[in-house]
Amino acid sequence: MIRQSVLKETYTMLEEARMTLWLEIVQHEALEGPLEPDKGPLIDQTVQVEKENDRVKITIKDILPRTQDMIKKTIMRNYWYTLMNHVLQKVNVHYDAIILTLKIFYPTRNSWDVDNRPVKFIIDSLRYNRVIADDSWDKLGLQILGGYDPDNPRTEIIIEPMPCF
């Protein structure tokens, strides 16, 4: 029988290695060009953005890790900031206040706690890219939804202006 501690440790090491490798490839491609020219840069294969009127939908072909306490904060922060910075520079939007919806589609039907996801990095990237001036209660409403998609696990980030109330 596999011990829970071994599974956690292995998961942590794999996630850190995957994110570190991805960041190294993206940095290399920024200097040298795409590793696969026919597919374009890896970062453009990982993120997609759609803008319709005041609504922005960002799709990231990755899921927020299970918990922010297991994986080194600097690795996770650099990975998610790089993704978000890249895509937010393309849309260049600014809002007084927003409703932020995060939809996390997992490849399994296992249930998970919505409060165990490191959403801070996504929210902070919105501030750092000046999408919103502040992430206080009057500038940001947040909803986190889960989904099941075994063929296309992903995180969808939907940004919409907050209606006045």
Image: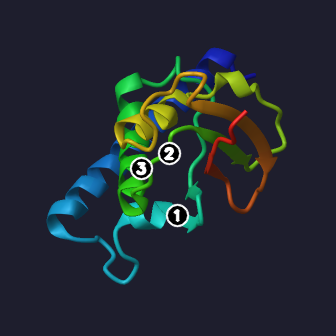
Residue on which the image places disc 3: 83
Graded by Cα atoms within 10 Å as few (under 14), some (14 to 19) or many (20 or more), the crowding at tag 2 reads some
Q: Name the residue at 36% across, 48% down.
A: 85
Q: Name the residue at 59% across, 31% down.
A: 140
Q: How many marks?
A: 3
**Tag of residue 118:** none
Quadrant containing the C terminus in the rendered view: top right
Residue on which the image places disc 2: 95
For discs 1 and 2, the disc positioned in front in the rendered view: 2
> What amino acid does circle 2 point to?
Tyr
Q: Earlier in the sequence, mark 1 or mark 2?
A: 1
Please say if the residues under marks 1 and 3 sit with CB atoms less than 8 Å apart. Answer: no
- Figure quadrant of residue 98: top right
**Tag of residue 49:** 1
> What amino acid does circle 1 point to?
Val
x, y percentage for residue 159? 60, 49
Quadrant containing the N terminus in the rendered view: top right
Q: Is residue 39 left or right of residue 103?
A: left
> What amino acid does circle 3 point to?
Leu
- Figure quadrant of residue 75: top left
x, y percentage for residue 22? 37, 50
Front residue (pair 150, 145):
145
Distance in Å between CA atoms under marks 1 and 3:
11 Å
For discs 1 and 3, the disc positioned in front in the rendered view: 1
Graded by Cα atoms within 10 Å as few (under 14), some (14 to 19) or many (20 or more), the crowding at tag 1 reads some
Front residue (pair 116, 52):
52
